Image (tube, rainbow, N blue to C red):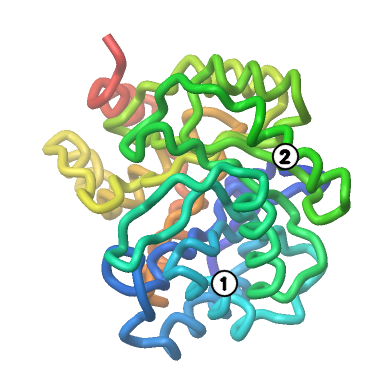
Amino acid sequence: MTDLSKAGTFKLGDKTVKRMGYGAMQLAGPGVFGPPKDRAGAVAVLRAALEAGVDHIDTSDFYGPHVTNEIIREALHPYPQHLTIVTKIGATRGSDGSWNPAFSNGELRQAVEDNLRNLGVEAMDVVNLRLMFDVHGPVEGPIEVPLTALAELKHAGLVRHIGLSNATALQVGEGRTITEIVCVQNHYNLAHRADDGLIDDLAKAGIAYVPFFPLGGFSPLQSETLSNVAEGLGKTPMQVALAWLLRRSPNILLIPGTSKVAHLHENLAAAEMQLPADAAAELDRIGAVK
């Protein structure tokens, strides 16, 4: 069995978690909408993740909507004490599968309550406020009102810790003046490196950085350099891409997702990889910000 502890640990809220976790987005249907084709398979993946030592699961009630949280509850409830479940709010899904901003106080409270009900918990470990000024990436916009509303839900005991998702460095700085921010979840991977500076700043502050689409998301990473390095190491390109992220900074927590048990174990095996310095340097050049 893969030893996930070899990748190290980092603080996430009031818990310390292994740096290799699991993202539940792919447990929903195509386009993260509707039910999966194989619900029993989705349950099996979650149980296999915990059996392998995963102690950090990322989800959202707008995956499906409601689908992934209901599957997580079916597979894992009652949850072990060491498990940290992180969700995100700030959006709703249209009947056509569209992603729509949902920032009002009422919408945010409803989203938290939906997560609590569907997961079967009394308080969420971590809730990320997903900033929806642009679905495709972070852009500047006002966050004081929605983040203050989320902080009030924390004060009420429904949320233990707060993070930000799809946020700019300025928004993270503003957020930290409103409430404690324990993590930032943004698009980042070997080829998408816009957050290099933010990651380093967060590391100095002891704040976790959780890259979404660590393997490229709906458009998997494609790089001749990555393929060549992986072949030389006897690993898959995706394992090497994950190992590079773990090497990039100690505050990076990974949440690669899959709906297949075999693929889960392949991803988790990256926790044991040690990239040679020359291979890491070659990979660095793929997406380094000029």
Taking the image as shown, residue 117 lies to the left or right of residue 275, namely right
Measure the alpha-carbon separation of dots 2 and 1: 23 Å
- Against 246, residue 50 (above or below) is below
Which residue ends up furthest to the top in the rendered image? 290
Residue at 45%, 47% (x, y): give it.
273
Q: Amino acid at mark 2?
A: Ala
Quarter the C terminus occupies: top left
Nearer to me, 168 or 152: 152
Tell me, for residue 69, which label it has, or none. Answer: 1
Residue 172 in the image, given as x and y percentages of width and height: 60, 22
Residue 22 in the image, given as x and y percentages of width and height: 52, 60
| Disc on the earlier residue, 2 or 1 | 1
- Against 131, residue 193 (above or below) is above
The crowding category of the residue bearing disc 2, from other C-alpha atoms within 10 Å (few below 14, some 14 to 19, many at least 20), is some
Residue at 36%, 61% (x, y): give it.
94
Tell me, for residue 149, which label it has, or none. Answer: 2
- Against 70, residue 162 (above or below) is above
Q: Amino acid at mark 1?
A: Asn
Residue 277 in the image, given as x and y percentages of width and height: 39, 26
